[in-house]
Amino acid sequence: MLFGAEHVKRYRETGGAEGHDWQGTTVLILTTTGRRSGELRSTPLIYREVGATGGYAVVASNGGGDEPNWYLNLVENPEVEVQVKDDVFPAHARVATADEKPDLWKELVATWPQYDEYQAKATREIPVVVLDRNFADSTD
């Protein structure tokens, strides 16, 4: 079973042919900048597509534990890189608004039902993060 650094490696090597489809759901690779180290950090995360904007939603669950490092990194620096299959692009990460979150949460739980269990045992509200694709300004 792919997980962690090996998951990222195989996903990247195969353009997502290995690692995108994972345990009945789909995974993207999120690359953040380490808030202390300044180094790039890549994490495989379950996702759902958001609307028609080319954006994606992920959950900062950490299994119901403390905030995951990737989340703390993007709070510090929201400019990230996303890879979905062989599509690699810059994105801006933001926490879903109170209006957005209920519908996104429902979609994400449909993809990975354990999110409800993680929230039930968490001592914090688990955020949903929206990864909005950065489009180059075409008026140059």
Image (tube, rainbow, N blue to C red):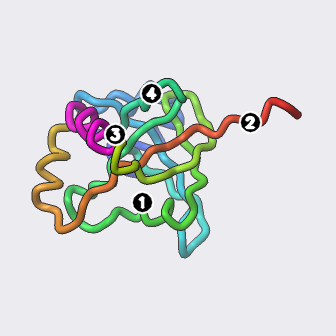
Task: Tell us which disc is closer to us: 3 or 4.
Answer: 4
Residue at x-position 48% and y-position 52%: 94
Q: Nearer the viewer, residue 12 or 96?
A: 96
Task: Tell me the distance, in whole angstroms, between the alpha carbons under discs 1 and 4.
Answer: 22 Å
Query: Which image quarter is the N terminus in?
Result: top left
Which residue does the numbered mark 1 point to in the structure image? Answer: 71
Q: Is residue 84 magenta?
A: no
Query: Which image quarter is the C terminus in?
Result: top right
Q: Is residue 87 above or below residue 73?
A: above
Q: Position of residue 29 (x, y in %)?
A: 47, 42
Task: Bin the neighbour count of mark 1 within 10 Å (Cα to Cα): few under 14, some 14-19, many 20 and up.
Answer: many
Which residue does the numbered mark 4 point to in the structure image? Answer: 51
Q: Name the kind of residue labelled 4 in the image.
A: Gly
Magenta segment: 101-111
Q: Nearer the viewer, residue 63 or 138?
A: 138
Assign a secondary structure to mark 1: helix
Q: Of the residues under marks 2 and 4, which one precedes in the sequence? A: 4
Residue at x-position 36% and y-position 42%: 100
Q: How many marks?
A: 4
Q: Of the residues under marks 1 and 4, which one precedes in the sequence? A: 4
Which residue does the numbered mark 3 point to in the structure image? Answer: 46
| In contact (CB < 8 Å): disc 3 and disc 2 | no
Task: Bin the neighbour count of mark 3 within 10 Å (Cα to Cα): few under 14, some 14-19, many 20 and up.
Answer: some
Assign a secondary structure to mark 3: strand
Residue 136, numbered label = 2
| In contact (CB < 8 Å): disc 2 and disc 1 | no
Q: Position of residue 79 (x, y in %)?
A: 60, 54
Task: Tell us which disc is closer to us: 2 or 4.
Answer: 4
